[in-house]
Image (tube, helix red, strand yellow):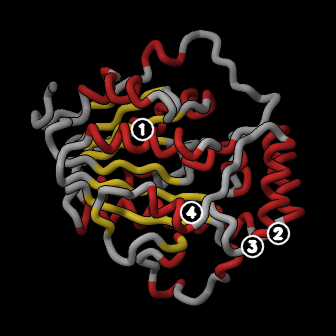
């Protein structure tokens, strides 16, 4: 480990990860860029916009759903930093930087927080510097990797230089496991990363489901597949299984808009408009 408590401002660089010729994959839709377009961002391309608009045609609630997912991420970040005292975070599936980013939320609570971001979208890599704006007391780093490569993530110098694997870590996989269609592989990926975390760490996830609007979401899945993007829905029972062996925080695994909701938002969202379960659990 290096300089964990020296108080100097640090911002790990993507360095050679960016390379000189980055394939942005603009000819095919990407989940992170669809998300960016729906939220009003500008880092998306025609393939992403086409997929997003086609999805909105069959499920107009997509925008409500994605905003709820973003709000869930913010509540998770604040909860782990403020309520559980976590100061180290591993955010897999970072997405295109949109303020407030995860590190901005946790460093507002605790300026000395350290965050490692992971994503496989080349657009995120291009904008990685936006994820490096750490407080002087804390640190942020970025790793270009796929969540299916847990060994690469866990052995990355950027991670080992930023996080102390002997101290509790907050692991977040927000709206990510639906990109792995095979159930066994999805559970195995999560288990491998969680197994590496020390006791007292927390795991937070948002898991796609079609439990509340199966007909509409079947059409959403068809649109995603037609545009070359993966989308796997899971039942509540399947979602809970991602937390096997861990101690779930109240209220357990629920739709994301019902997980520690802001009081002003209670009762304002139709369950049929939310296609994601969420929860946080502690590793004993």
Q: Which residue is mark 4?
A: 69
Q: Position of residue 11 (x, y in %)?
A: 32, 31
Mark 4 or 1, nearer chain start: 4
Disc ID at residue 215 = 2
* CB atoms of marks 3 and 2 within 8 Å: yes
Mark 2 neighbour class, 10 Å CA radius: few under 14, some 14 to 19, many 20 or more: few
Taking 54 as reference, is 38 left or right?
left
> Residue visible at 28% across and 44% down?
135
Query: On screen, 251 above or below 201?
Result: below
User: Disc 1 marks which residue?
Assistant: 117
From the image, state whether disc 4 or disc 2 is nearer to you. Answer: 2
Quick one: SS at disc 1? strand
Name the quadrant containing residue 218.
bottom right
Q: CA distance from mark 4 to mark 1?
A: 18 Å
Closer to the N terminus: mark 3 or mark 4? 4
Disc 1 and disc 3 in contact, CB within 8 angstroms: no
Numbered label attached to residue 245 = none
- Report the quarter where the C terminus lies: bottom left
């Amino acid at each position: 480990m290096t300089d964990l408590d020296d108080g100097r401002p640090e911002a790990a660089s993507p360095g050679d990860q960016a390379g000189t010729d980055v394939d942005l994959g603009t000819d095919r839709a990407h989940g992170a860029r669809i998300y960016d377009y729906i939220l009003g961002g500008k880092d998306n391309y025609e393939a992403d916009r086409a997929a997003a608009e086609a999805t909105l045609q069959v499920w107009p609630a997509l925008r409500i759903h994605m905003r709820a997912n973003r709000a869930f991420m913010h509540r998770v970040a604040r909860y782990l930093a403020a309520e559980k005292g976590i100061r180290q975070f591993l955010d897999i599936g970072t997405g295109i930087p949109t303020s407030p980013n995860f590190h901005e939320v946790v460093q507002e609570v605790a300026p000395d927080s350290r965050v490692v971001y992971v994503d496989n979208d080349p657009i995120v890599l291009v904008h990685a510097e936006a994820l490096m704006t750490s407080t002087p007391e804390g640190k942020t780093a970025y790793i270009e990797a796929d969540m299916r490569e847990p060994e690469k993530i866990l052995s990355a110098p950027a991670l080992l230089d930023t996080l102390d694997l002997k101290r509790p870590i907050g692991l977040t996989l927000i709206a990510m496991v639906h990109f792995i269609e095979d159930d066994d592989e999805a559970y195995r990926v999560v288990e491998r990363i969680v197994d590496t975390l020390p006791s007292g760490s927390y795991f937070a996830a948002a898991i796609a489901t079609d439990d509340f609007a199966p007909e509409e979401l079947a059409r959403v899945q068809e649109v995603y597949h037609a545009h070359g993007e993966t989308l796997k829905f899971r039942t509540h029972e399947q979602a809970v299984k991602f937390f096997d062996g861990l101690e779930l925080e109240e209220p357990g695994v629920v739709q994301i808009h019902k997980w520690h909701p802001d009081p002003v938002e209670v009762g304002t969202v139709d369950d049929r408009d939310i296609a994601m379960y969420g929860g946080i659990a502690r590793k004993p």
